[in-house]
Amino acid sequence: MHTAYHLRLKSQNLVHRLQNRESCYTRIGSKLNQSPYLSYERGFYKSITPCLTIDSVAIPPVYLRKFTPDGSKLLAFSLDQRSLHIYKYKGLGASGVGELIRETNVGEIESYRVPSQGSKLTNTIFDRLFATNDVRILRLCQGDYGRFYLHREFSVFLENGRYVLLAAMCILHGALATSYYVSYPDLFDKLDAFSYIFFVVDLVVGVVTDRLFLPQDSIVIAHNHGISVHDSSIAIMSRLYQCIYIYEVVAGRLVKRETIGPRPRGFIDEGPLDIGLDANTILPITHIKQRVLSFLYRQIDSNSSRLSKKYQDFYKNFDFLEHMIMEKMQLVNRDLICLRFEERPKDNNINPMLTLGEIPTPRRFYVFYTILGEQVVGVYQDDSVELLQIILQFYDQMRNVRSLHTGDAPSLPPQFFLKQNFVDANKTIPFMRQAALRFNPSVPVSTQSFSPSPYLKYNEFSYDDRLISPLERPKPCSAEPIIFRDRTTKLVKFRLNAKARRQNNPLAPRELCAFICHPFEPLILSIQKYLHIYAYNIHLYNHSTVVVQESA
């Protein structure tokens, strides 16, 4: 019986094959080693933490989004979601925040909270931290774009924060033209169609440098899910047309490179587009799926003792592969793209009955595809231990997020746990496959969806990652403050007090909390939301705060 050690050797051989390709992971490693981030590397002191919570602070009437990579600005959207607000960050030392805290006589407490009418501290702390009187407002959705609204959960920084890519959308009504079903054989029409406008905003000059209009499409904008960035390359995945648009940012302008799918580059289609379509019409398989099928067929070892069974499995899964849809993608580098294909949703949710011992049909395939060569270089299923090993070895590079201050990538709880517990030669194959089923869905990685804040590094601090993590997603509010302990000494370093304001009721909507972390300073903004009610807290360093210790 094979052990995980033998599987690891096999996966290392596969990784070595990928590394030998000019377009694969090695290029990422070399680029990160030459990254300008490393020239800005500074120390990180665990004794300076966001240890003071100021509860229920007043902010301008906006939706806060996130800090720029250098931490010099905070982006926000207007309440009507038509304008971008750019606030300059003054810094903890230069804004008189310490004097304001001393004037309020906060003392040594870890959490400052006042009655509903507020205080000078809660009413003015945001103005001390950010230049609210010098805010730059860009009205993006007006005139011809007046029916569009900016998506509050999307923003992608380019060129180390010089530019930001924003998205506006509006819903469309009407059926798709018949010719689209011929031009895009994988067209997934069980989606609502929207029109999109992507804005490239120069944050230094404060102007819109370019716009990209994509009519009648379906793109997952929330949490940067359907857009991936690497250096100056931008990939936008259309779930409706099942293709990927590749753009290049040149001096603030979006220049289209190509479209990946549904046909290979240089394909000349002279067939008519107005053919009659009905339920029996058979359209060609897209070229990526053809390459996936060819790759899987060529992976069958003709000298294997189970050759007949492997061929049976290949043909058994042929129908699934033919009809699967592309759900997510990521630019690993300028030439390598990671795709996740999933089962096409059916009109009914009835699962097929399996006979005893029958292996269920795979629900996902992970495909590595080179843009320049239009070649599939790797295909993995849900429970692939080889893919798990690749994730372990290259996940820092695949996240493509580095701190401009320290040069470090975020340290995530799942990967920390995985490296501590699952990389063990004595683990059995079923155990490793269960680990793969759990962690393989972490790729492809949504672009710029992790905070590089050193105070969320899981290899430095231990905390409950169900309540907060570097992954920038809202979390359920906790009943108690979130405790951060030094992973070495087990001492409590700080607490984030963002407790739920209402009793937990299983029948009521959950109270959620989102965190906006400064990329390197001890400053965190927390936003609590219950229905349509928002509360804002600021967590920052205060030298007078005494962190109370308690037993682990």
Image (spheres, rainbow, N blue to C red):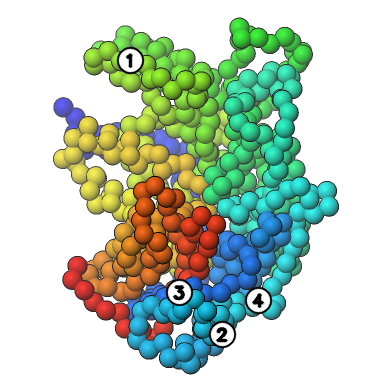
**Residue at 41% in and 87% down:** 106
Q: Amino acid at mark 2?
A: Ser
* Secondary structure at numbered mark 1: loop
Q: Amino acid at mark 3?
A: Asp
Residue 338 x %, y %? 50, 37
- 2 vs 4, front mark: 4
Real-space Cα separation, disc 2 to disc 3, in angstroms: 19 Å
Q: Amino acid at mark 1?
A: Met
The answer to whether residue 415 is visible is no
Residue 548 x %, y %? 27, 79
Do the residues bearing badges 1 and 3 touch, measured as CB atoms within 8 Å?
no
Q: Mark 4 packing: few (<14 Cα in 10 Å), some, or many (20+)?
A: some
Q: Identify the residue position indicated by label 4 in the image.
A: 132
Of labels 4 and 1, earlier in sequence is 4
Of labels 1 and 3, earlier in sequence is 3
Of labels 2 and 1, earlier in sequence is 2
Do the residues bearing badges 3 and 4 touch, measured as CB atoms within 8 Å?
no
* Secondary structure at numbered mark 4: helix
Q: Quadrant of residue 300?
A: top left
Residue farthest to the top, as pictured: 280
Real-space Cα separation, disc 3 to disc 4, in angstroms: 20 Å
Q: Quadrant of residue 50?
A: bottom left
Q: Amino acid at mark 4?
A: Thr
Q: Which mark is residue 55?
A: 3
The answer to whether residue 58 is visible is yes
Q: Mark 2 packing: few (<14 Cα in 10 Å), some, or many (20+)?
A: some
Q: Which mark is residue 353?
A: 1
**Residue at 71% in and 60% down:** 83
Q: Which mark is residue 95?
A: 2
